[in-house]
Structures are given as structure tokens and as C-alpha cells.
Image (cartoon, rainbow, N blue to C red):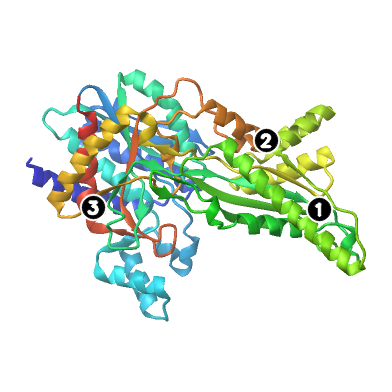
Amino acid sequence: MTTDTAVQTAARRARDLSVQMTRWPSVTGSPDEAAFCERLRAHLADTPYFRRYPDQLFTVDSHGEPMTSTVVALARGSGRRTVVLAGHFDTVSIANYRALAALACDPAPLTQALMAELRGRRRNRAEEKALADFESGDFIAGRGLLDMKSGLAAGIAALERFVAMEAPQGNILFVATPDEENRSRGMRSLRNALPAIARRFDLDIVAGINLDASSCELDGEEGRAVYLGSVGKFAPFAFVIGRPTHAGYPFDGTSASRIGAEIVRAMDTVPELSDDAFGERAPPPVCLEARDVRDGYDVTTPDRVWLSFNWLTHRRRAAEILDDFRAIVAGALHTALETQDAHHARFRSDPVAKTHGVVLTYAELIARLKAQGGDALARLEALDRSLSGGNDPLKVSREIVAAAAAEAGIEGPAVIIGFGSLHYPLVHLDQTGDIGHTMQSRLQSVMADTAKQHGMSIKFKQIFAGISDMSFFGHRPDTGETGILAANTPSAAFTDVAPEGLLSFPTVNIGPWGRDYHQKWERVHAHYTFGVLPDLVFEAALACMAE
């Protein structure tokens, strides 16, 4: 098969398979997610290669009931050098399609229906852009088509092109994982199983290519990219404890809402808190949740308020984030109490006693409970186990922190801080030293050749902006970092406990691009995703496998 024919065949295969897999719904946490694994395994099992080598196609259990698993497919050439192509198959909910939900996973009719809907009413700027994209014929809609079944299809097309070669050198290990949209349990379970897989098949895993999607609001120049790293994510929380009082006597207590408002003001979208490295700047932290923790109504000032933030990083580590967050919260607490005291003094026209508060980390709160003795820790562990099946990390963490504060008898004004959900480590090719630099050099050549062949630009970008499975792909967690996170994350279900002996290898992200992923107008750019991406992934894999 000539190179041009092979590229064209891979493009058609990627397009057809993308549509086919999109028609298999796989919303995170649904029975469809578990069913997708078997559908994909059965599809691959019916191909000529895996009919000949059925032992090289199998699944790795991940989590849930029914069990949700990862599909693993090994294409063997000569030698031990192996590249892993990885992507996730779970998707976000289809609820935001509303009346079109029945079409959400059927790209062609959905695209037509979305165009009809948009043409039939007034449109905002984003909707005008979506309609223009659809009418151009360059973009196709579908829940999960962009994020990220078209990436999986590119990986499968590259794998099939590899096994069609006359005497391929190296090996490709393709993996399709569940649960990326929740807490990456699929990739983390596969990561843990990978050393045994490498021993079983005598593989030397030298590189990984993640196949996740990116967004580009321009003409695609920013979307046609090879990402050298993936952003880190922390989820700091602040559980604010005030001193409740009747609304008719506001200065007899301290409102947790006042303290919480100052913390939000000090944290939310503050540019000085953004992180920069590799010549790129992360977004500043944002408040994801702010709620009064009460079950009913009464004319009493709030005594407990829960706040959670999303803080993306390009270089900063857990200890630094926790220290900085503590300083910010302590400053906000001081400002809130000082302001209330000043209001009280003006109301009375007389000086008042200064109000003091305290900030504790979750680890310090647990230390207090240990010092008290008794069964409090056992009750908290039992609560954690009862909540561990929940998919809302903030709700689980909030309930555990509330129970721990009550067990410790913490009185306000006080703020308990910690991490409310799974930490995604920052990863970057630079962290792997010389082997990473060699991989980047090889990819530079591949990108230049592929761009010339297809008549378009392909660039390096430093940091993949969306949290992704790449954080756990070929990356061995730092034990010191893990210890700080575990001590200050209330639920064990949202900590990453990594076993000894994990494999470490350089990884990059090479995936499709489109616009509005997770939204109703989610759409993939067809020409790049089906015509260029499978070729780029295939050539990148060959370059990384070369001796």
C-alpha cells in the first residue's frame, strides 16, 4: 500500500469509526459507560489482526457496578520498544441538548437539527459562530465526538495502519479508558496495571501519546498542536464557621457569609494568583461552589458556609498552594472581622472588643481529634466509606469536614481549609530530562513533514489547558506531594494512592480540535481530525519507537 493510499484509508477509517463510537453513548457513571468497553473490545476482536492474535486484546477492570473497564489492544512488530496510545471513552451528560437529547449521539442528524434550531431564532455571538461553522461543512456535532471519540478513532486507525506494514519495528499498545470526566479512575487503574502488562508481553514502554481534544476559537492554528505538558489542578476548600445570632441582634455573633464573601473576593479571578511557567500563564483561581450549609430557614445569621475553588498551576506544588491559600484565608478572615468590629463601633458610637478567629488545615483538625481520643476518627472513617460511591467530590468533602468540625467542637469564627477533590499533577516533557528532549526533537521533525504533506501548520504548545488523564499517564507521583494531599483531603476516595514500581515515560498530547466541548454546540473540525490527525499520530508513534 502506498503512503498516500495508507493515509487516505486511515482518514476514512477514522471518520467512520468516530461516528460509530459516538453512536455508542457512554456518559460517565451510567450503565452505557460500562457497556461501551465491551462494544469496543468486540469491535476490535472482529478485525483480522485480533482474530489472529486474540490474546493481545483484553480488558483491565477499573471500578463500579457493573464493572467499568479499560480496553487494551497490543499490535506487535519487532523488538521491545513500545509506544502507548491512550484516550478516554466516557462523556459528559447529554442533558444540555434538551429537546434534541435523543439525537445527541448521532452526528449527522444532530448537526442538521442544530442548524435548524439556530436558524429559527435570535442568536448570540457564540451561536452565530456555531451556525457558521456547521453551515461551512467543516464541523460536525455530537456528544463525545470531539471529546474524545475522534481521538480514539485516530489511535485505532494508526494501530491498524501499523499492523498492515510489511515488517514494522516496535509495538503499539492502544488503551481506551473510562472515567476521565470524573476522577480518572480508568487511567489510574491502567497505570497501576501497566508494569504487569509490560512484563507479560516483554515490552519496553518508551513513550506515551494522549489523544485528548483541545479547543480553538480561531482558524485552527492553536488547535493543530502537540502539547508537551498538561496543567496541574488543585481544589482548595474553605469551611467557614461563624457564630450564629438572631438577625435582630447582628453584632452578637459573626456571620459566616461575611467571612466567606471576603475569601471569595480575595481569591476569585485575582490575576496575581495565576501561575506561569514554560512561557505560558495559567488562569487565576475561580470559585466553583459557595453555599450556606443549612437544611432549613430561620431568622439566624449563617453559622457555616462552604467554599471551593479551582486553582490551575504550571509549576507550584501542594505545600506552596496550601501555605498561600492559608495566608489568603487568614487575611480575608481578619478583614471580615475587623470590618464587622468597625461597623459595630459606629453603630454603638463606642469602641468594642476586637474579634479573633482561627484558620486550621484539615490535617490540624484531625490532629486535634486524635489528641482528644475516643471514637471520633472511627466515625469519620465510617462516614467516608458510606459516601465513597458518590460522584460529587465537593459534597462528599463538605459532609466529612462538617462532621469533623462538629466532633472537634470547633467554635467560630474559624475556617477549616484543605483540598476538596482529586489533585491532577502538572506534567511536562521537561520533567523527563534527556529522553523527553529526544522525544521532542523527533516530534519536531514529524510535525514539519506532516504539516508540509497536508499543507497546514502544526505547532508545539507547552501546557494542555484542560485537566486530563495525561496527569497520570507515564507519571510517578512524588511521595512528599502525595502525603500532604492525603493528609488534607477529607475523603480517601479523592486521593491518589499509587503503588510502588510504576512505570515512568515521557508523554505528549496529540488530539483533535474543535469548539465548545461539553456544550450543546460541541463540534469537531472534520478535515484536521479525520484527514491529518491519524497520519500525525501514526508517524509520531513510529518516530518514538525508533532505536
Residue occupying image coordinates x 84% and y 46%:
411
Image quadrant holding the N terminus, namely top left
In front of the other: label 2 or label 3? 3
Residue occupying image coordinates x 85% and y 62%:
300
In the picture shown, does residue 492 fall above or below 276? above
Disc 1 secondary structure class: loop
Disc 3 secondary structure class: helix
N-terminal of the pair, mark 3 or mark 1, is 1
> Taking the image as drawn, is residue 386 in sight?
yes
Residue bearing the label numbered 1 = 242
Q: Position of residue 113 (x, y in %)?
A: 36, 71
- In the image, taking residue 32 as reference, residue 437 lies left or right, namely left
Residue bearing the label numbered 3 = 530
Q: Position of residue 164 (x, y in %)?
A: 15, 35
Residue bearing the label numbered 2 = 385
Q: Amino acid at mark 3?
A: Phe
Residue situated in front as seen by the camera: 81 or 323: 323
N-terminal of the pair, mark 1 or mark 2, is 1
- In the image, taking residue 344 as reference, residue 314 lies left or right, namely left
N-terminal of the pair, mark 2 or mark 3, is 2
